[in-house]
Amino acid sequence: MIEISATEIKKQKKLVLTWSITFLTVFPLLIILGLLMRLNQGEKISLGMDNFYVLMTLHGLGMAGILYSIAFAALWYLIGTRYAKLNTGTGYFVFFMVLAGVAGLVIATLIGKFGAGWYLLYPLPFKGTFWPTWATGLSIISLIILGIAWLIGIIHLVYALAKEFGGFSNLLGWQYIRKKEVDRELPPIVLITTVSLVPGVIAFIAGAVFLVMFLLQHFEPTLAFDPLLLKNLIFFFGHTLVNITLYCCIGWVYALLPEFTGRPWKVDKVVVYSWNATFFFILFAYFHHLYMDFVQPLPFQYAGQIASYLSAIPATAITMFGVIAQLYHSKVKWGVIPLSFLLGTAGWAIGGFSAVVDSTIAANKVLHNTLWVPAHFHTYMLGGVVLFILGFLFYLSHSKEEQEKDKMAKFGLWLFVIAVHSFIATFYRGGLRSIPRRYSDYGGIRIEYTHSTGALLAQIASVFIGLLLVGLIIMYVSIIVKLSKRKIPSAGA
Amino acid sequence: MSFIIKTLIFESVFQANPIVMIQFIPLLTIQTFAAVISFIAGALVTLVVFFLIFTSSKEEDKTSAKHKVYKMRGRYFFGLVLSIVIVLLLTLRLLPYEKFQGTPEETVTVVAMQWMWKMGPGLSDKKPAEFGGAGEITLPANKMIRFVVTSSDVNHSFGIYNSKGVLVTQTQAMPQYNNILEHVFDEKGEYHILCLEYCGLPHGLMVGKININ
């Protein structure tokens, strides 16, 4: 078993702080882009269609990128200070490559006005565009840089873990199935890191394939690829990236929650079966993005619904019941960290349920590309992932006692959570009223009810976005004040 | 015994016609159903959260607490698996794809292009870019209409809304492919077509109309 030196821990702390400060800076800016979009849809400001789609593209790419990056960085920190020796030089290399990719995307969108949406659905970036071709090229190259950075990070982390725990199959917990007694216990965070990040490798390879095809098309415009194949590659990449972001967060919930409840949370056979099944559900669930492509082979459509439904079994019966078993009659003191984890799990459960509803082909027919879709992924991301990340940042900045007594942080958290769910409720309502997504405004719709309802819901949403920003700022003050005053608690202590 | 159980499950679940079942509850549109079950799920999750917060001050031995939770988990697991199987068996027969629909009585060609809809009666043998349909078409009520949907440039989505603003059905309009969408309009009046896949700057202005008489 590896010994991590104090110097090494200090280096890893610096790295995770660099990531955290980047997240804390970028995240509210991206929320403001969302606010501007909703204000425009609510007809309170006039951005112009071009600026709306530029902001939509940056908001989508930025949020998916920054949330994945901080989730990965948090896992890197916990693994690198507890279980395996991770090279901080590689860590910084990944950080600066990500920064370069982000800078490229910011230039391509804000200066080049690239506005193809986060998913660059082929052949949209090349046909009827309102932005110059250099912006398309820069976006593709920036995304390739991001993909390479993340791939290097994942490979380094998983390789270091495999070396430490005696092989890749041990990281998946197969020794629990092969033997009655294991030689060395597998920490749940290691199992979950593997299950989350290995599908990530496959997704980034799929991403690399479609981005190289895009690059070829960029330099040779007469080329024409199969749009259905490209759609499969794009959604496999995008869906998996977002999905594994959540699972990365669950990794540290398993690792950190027991520190507050005093109840161990260990790997056993059930946990191994559950997370190994999740590995496959992550890979096959993306098919639910293509239900409305009727030419997609029928077995893939079935696979999408079945994998999406089955993913609810390990998520709820194992992890969510695991959270309940941790907290039930535990005498836990409701500091801001366990509270963030509990409320994040609730957001995950609600967002997951509405995702399952949308993953039902018969329902998708009338919910696909309505506001129901942003409703469910905002519940999942803003009401789940972001709360897990905030919980982790409180863990970095606050001692156990401080996080219990910090009333301001708890007030900020509750305000944020209430505002988030109220904001998301306007999306759900919009979805149920068939309001289309990705509309810069609803003025072009000739059904007056749809136009007026869409605009009204966007106005209400803007108020709650303002409120959630207030909650976020309150938490920021608490985190930044504590970070500047004290040394970070040593991990694993 | 197992034969009886299998027969019961087969008769009650697999042989049940979900379309007929849904017709018994005419007010239950897919959207309403989604709203009701999602609200119930959200309320249950909220209850669990507050239950955990307000009862956590009670101290219980971790083995005993774990035993209680895991006992409940066992029941939940079987309930969930059973629910998933039943819902899959019911809903996977309600697919919008061609082989799950009836015999079409009329065919309409639909070509999407940045940023308009072109529709015309019959199956066109022209290339999508050369197809000369109109953005408005008149069709009969209560007949199975077969829409052959494609695109001459980028991805679009052919979303049909009724006059009350309810999305009734949709399919993607994708270059190089024909998606077959079959639908029976059971109400006379105006239906609106909106594009539901982001297709460029005036995406929100890409509209069309279907008159049903």
Image (spheres, grey):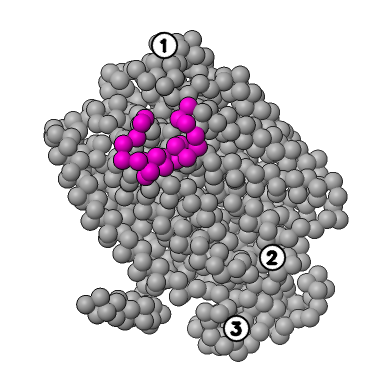
Q: Which residue is mark 2?
A: B174
Query: Residue B176 sits in which quadrant?
Result: bottom right
- Write the residue at 45% across / 12% down: A5
Q: Are marks 3 and 2 in contact (CB under 8 Å)?
A: no
Percent coordinates x, y for residue B185 in the rendering = 53, 82
Q: Which mark is residue A487?
A: 1
- Quarter of the image that includes the N terminus of chain A: top left
Judge whether A480 appears above or below A225 on screen.
Answer: above
Q: Which residue is mark 3?
A: B145
Q: Chain of mark 2?
A: B
- Write the residue at 27% across / 79% down: B3
Q: Is residue A444 left or right of residue A27?
A: right
Query: Residue A266 sits in which quadrant?
Result: top left
Q: Is residue A15 left or right of residue A192?
A: right
Q: Is residue A388 visible?
A: no
Secondary structure under badge 1?
A: loop
